Image (cartoon, grey):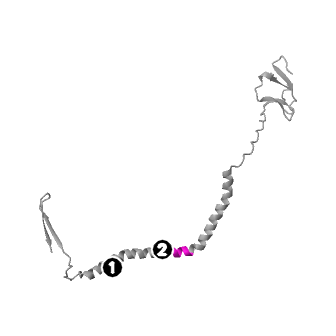
Amino acid sequence: MYSDTPYEITPTTPYPGPFDRPTEVRRPVILPAEIPPGVDWVTLPSGVRTLAYTHPTPPPTPVPAGQPIPAWAKTTALLAPTVGGGIAAAGIGLSYAAPGLIAMSHALWSAAALVVAAVIAVPVLLRTARRAATGTGTGSSGPGSTTHITQNITATGLFGRANGTINNS
């Protein structure tokens, strides 16, 4: 197969048709040392031998051994349906309790309004009761009449000295 000549002569069949092809093709001879890695002689389905890139099949990767399931994962997996069931039960309970909760919220608003009314009404009632007991009020001149203090302050100019008087009546 290998010869001293730099070319190998391979006979081919002539091409049938108006154009004649040469009956022999000169190809360079390739020495086995010149073939790069990953390239090898292959035989095509037509029977022609040629150089081609071959992809070696990689060695099978070993399948890793199964790891044991951690305890926290087991616990979480077992608790998930329980928590979901508890949430569902709470939702059903709230749906049954909704009318009572609405009534309680109305009662709380009523209680808050009562507290606000008491905070406003009690001082007004105490003030009215005190005025009635002491006899003070509009038009009364009893012993508990209120004292009116009047102040008159005057000043001259922007930075002038201020003078004032206080009148007790």
Mark 1 residue type: Leu
Label number found at residue 125: 1
Mark 2 residue type: Leu
Of the 4 image quadrants, the one containing the C terminus is bottom left
In the rendered image, the vertical position of residue 102 relative to residue 23, given as above or below:
below
Q: Position of residue 2 (x, y in %)?
A: 85, 20
Task: Determine the secondary structure under disc 1.
Answer: helix
Q: Quadrant of residue 79?
A: bottom right
Indicate left or right for 65 with 72 as reference. Answer: right
Residue drawn 86% across the image and 25% down it: 10
Q: Quadrant of residue 58?
A: top right
In the rendered image, the vertical position of residue 74 relative to residue 165, given as above or below:
above
Asked whether the residues under the numbered discs 1 and 2 touch, taking CB atoms below 8 Å apart as contact, a structural biologist would say no
Q: Position of residue 87 (x, y in %)?
A: 62, 64
Which residue is identified by label 2? 108
The segment highlighted magenta reads: 99-109
